[in-house]
Image: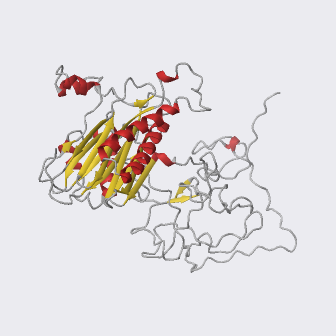
Amino acid sequence: MTPQMPQQAAWSKCPGCEEPLESGDLFCGACGYDLSAVAEPPRDRPAVAAGAQVHWPEAPGADGSGRPGTLQRPGEVPGTDSGGRELPTTPVLFDGPDTAPGAATARPAVQGAGTAARFGPAAPGGAASAASGASPAADPGPAPRSSGSGSGSGSGDFELAAPDPRAAGHCGGHSAAPPPGAKLCVACRAGHVDHDGYCENCGHAQPRERDHMEQELGSVAAVSDRGLRHHRNEDSFAVSSTALPDGSPAVIAIVCDGVSSATRPDDASSAAAGSANEHLLASLPRGTHPQQAMHEAILAAASAVNSLAAEPGAAMEHDPHRHQNAPACTLVGAVAAGELLVVGWVGDSRAYWVPDDRSGPPARLTEDDSWAAQMVSAGLMSEAEAYADERAHAITGWLGADAYELEPHTASFKPDRPGVVVVCTDGLWNYAEAPEEMAQVLPPDAAGRPLHGAQVLVGHALDGGGHDNVTVAVLPFAVPRQGAGLA
């Protein structure tokens, strides 16, 4: 194809500088504008259909002085869209220099999740969303712990979210209401969650039930959290209460930590906590001594974990090496019954004693089944040297089919003053290892508010990095009468 010379645009004036042009000019002599790139101007006016007349209304407030009148806002003038539907009449907030100070203009409610568009600087003082009765934007739930600024923290603008076409009311008129009793999405608060754990409206993955668990039962409470680094929560707990033969209460707290290097650690901790708790609830009302009941409860928990290695239908059922990496966990428990405080454990989960009035020293009530503890007890290393070693937290005792030898530890105490027992996994005590550190973190009113105390302790571990699952139970101990001191 032979290239053609550009046609000259028949302009009388330069489109760039309004300088007069002469016939045949390809460039403006004043500014150098390339006239060959300019489309030829129209030679006549477009025809108007017969009988059709266009009447442009005069802008309100125009006084003939050339100054513009009051601007119209979208929604203030009725109209239709390209499909013939009426335009919404809800005004959209544009905070500009002409916005009247103190005007009560409402932000539109956000419908569904969508891409946010930003419009101009926010008016001083912000918009009064309650002025027009508009419903507030859907709360996406608490934001993750992270440092950052939200759109409402003085950023100078606001977000107007585009409606999600998948949300109810934006699906071509075929919106489906969630079935009765369906779990709503924590993100969009509109769609219901399918059996795979995803929202059918926005696709957001829902937090699993075990990612964060809390339970308060009278005078005992527990909190478990996945932490900030693990992909799942492998801890478990059980709190309960029963009555002794004389009618006095017995309060129970069990905490288990799944061994991550083993298979199904989450199942192991859940089975151990549930089994130990059930055994204590059955044996204590029969008059079994609390320390003996704790010993038997740990054996029952071990049996429950062992059974997971050969559970019918499990992948390891016919594996000849299934006992070499069987489900495993640690366990620590406490029972407050009458004058006695009984603890039992296997592994490196711990129990701490903190007096209510802080008049006496706090104490650690358990000894770890770990490499570091063995080195210290054998006199081979100091505590500082042992815990500085990379093998320090390798456990030497656990519940599981591959355990070398099960040796449940139990101890019985008679506190001489009221206090609180902190039963926890290493996900907490790694951030408050010494008893004095644990006492400093525990709120002074933990005996009266055990759930709040457990929440504070878990928050302390998460603020410290949350490298592991964190589980803690807070068990207040009230002295019925003056005891003989902490044994």
Q: Is residue 167 visible?
A: yes
The residue located at (20%, 25%) in the rendering is: 377
Q: Which residue is farthest right?
A: 50
Give the percent coordinates (x, y) of residue 255: 37, 43
> Compared to 111, does 373 lie above or below?
above
Q: Is residue 456 visible?
A: no
Decide which of 271, 262 is in the foreground and name it.
271
> Compared to 300, does 129 lie above or below?
below
The residue located at (33%, 54%) in the rendering is: 251
The residue located at (23%, 38%) in the rendering is: 433
Q: How many labels sit on residues?
A: 0
Give the percent coordinates (x, y) of residue 104: 47, 76
Image quadrant in which the N terminus is located? top right
Colour mapping used in the image? secondary structure
> Compared to 162, does 438 lie above or below?
above
Image quadrant in which the C terminus is located? top left
Decide which of 435, 21 is in the foreground and name it.
435
**Left or right of 317 in this view: 430:** left
Give the percent coordinates (x, y) of residue 65: 55, 77
Q: Which residue is farthest left?
A: 359
Decide which of 81, 204 is in the foreground and name it.
204
The residue located at (22%, 47%) in the rendering is: 353
Decide which of 379, 167 is in the foreground and name it.
379
Give the percent coordinates (x, y) of residue 293: 35, 44
